[in-house]
Image: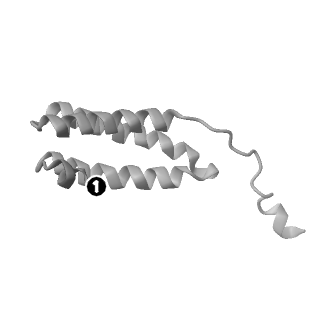
Amino acid sequence: MTSPGVLGYGDPASSVSWIAEPLAASIGFLAAFPITRGLRWANVAVGAGVAACALALDQPLDARMNALATGAALIVLAAATRDAPDRYAGGWRSLLR
């Protein structure tokens, strides 16, 4: 969210940053849990949207490079996998014991 201030670019590129970056962080936080791991694929859409806006909008070169790098990183990191546990503490049966 600080990239528009650090790199010194304004609208419309800053609006894309202020919308997409908190959205990607929220999705990433929720996807960190094993039960909601499937939400990580939403970050592929966010990354593709950021990259598409970088190509479609008239932006300074540093803003365009930042958006392309951020979009590519979101897509690559969303596709990264890790082993999720197969057990989730027994569900309702654990309460009946």
Please tell me which residue is depicted at 18% across the width and 30% down the height of the picture: 55
Coloration of the structure image: one colour
Q: Amino acid at mark 1?
A: Met
Q: Nearer the viewer, residue 8 or 88?
A: 8
In the picture of the structure, the residue carrying the numbered disc 1 is 1
37 left or right of 93? Answer: left
Question: How many callouts does the rendering have?
Answer: 1
Q: Is residue 12 visible?
A: yes
Q: Quadrant of residue 82?
A: top right
Q: Nearer the viewer, residue 45 or 63?
A: 63
Q: Position of residue 63 (x, y in %)?
A: 18, 40
Q: Position of residue 58 (x, y in %)?
A: 9, 36
Q: Quadrant of the C terminus?
A: bottom right
Please tell me which residue is depicted at 41% across the width and 42% down the height of the picture: 43
Please tell me which residue is depicted at 19% across the width and 35% down the height of the picture: 64
Q: Nearer the viewer, residue 85 or 1?
A: 1
